[in-house]
Image: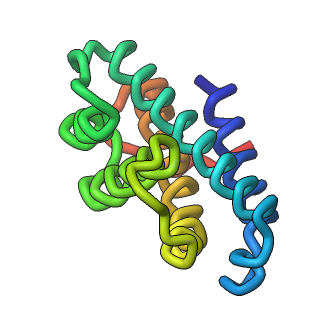
Amino acid sequence: MTDKMDDLEQCTRELEEYLPEGVDDYLESGIRRRACERTFQLACENLLDICNMIISDDGLGMPHDSKDAIRKLSQHNVISKSLASRLEELTGFRNLLVHQYGRVDDSLAYGCLYDESGDFYEFLEEIERFITSKRCGSGEHQDVERR
């Protein structure tokens, strides 16, 4: 699982690097726009892989879809309810990008991409607290510093 967590962190850093400061720069560069979208997609896939690994390892039941995988982690106090809600929206946006359910408004996409990296980092922090609490054998989550 640590490989997936490292990949998610790397994707998040790359997204921050690729994403320009302003929406106009984002809209003017098709290559940069697609790089951001693809990096976001990979970050989401790593996040969902992590969710599914925890669900499988802890016997939390079979999720119906990606949003249900996130919900299961929240229901079992692996991640907070507020983060779970934001991650469900994030995966919905990922599905929109990947499956192209209609034309994506690139200006709105920029705002979403710009705002989402914090949620990826928060997810990693909460997962690390969960893993540490399991290792320590306590029910309480503890703060852990990332390598």
Q: Position of residue 21 (x, y in %)?
A: 74, 82
Seen at 58% across and 23% down, the residue is 1
Seen at 77% across and 55% down, the residue is 14
Q: Nearer the viewer, residue 47 or 99?
A: 99
Q: Position of residue 109 (x, y in %)?
A: 53, 68
Residue 73, picture quadrant = top left
Of the 4 image quadrants, the one containing the C terminus is: top right
Relative to 89, 136 lies left or right: right
Q: Nearer the viewer, residue 95 or 12?
A: 95
User: Above or below — where is 115 with respect to 21?
Assistant: above
Seen at 34% across and 32% down, the residue is 138
Q: Position of residue 119 (x, y in %)?
A: 49, 60
Q: Position of residue 78 (x, y in %)?
A: 33, 39
Instruction: Name the residue furthest front.
Output: 102
| Residue 83 visible in the snapshot | yes
Relative to 101, 42 lies left or right: right
Question: What scheme was used to colour the molecule?
Answer: rainbow
Seen at 33% across and 21% down, the residue is 55
| Residue 77 visible in the snapshot | no
User: Above or below — where is 37 with respect to 68?
Assistant: below
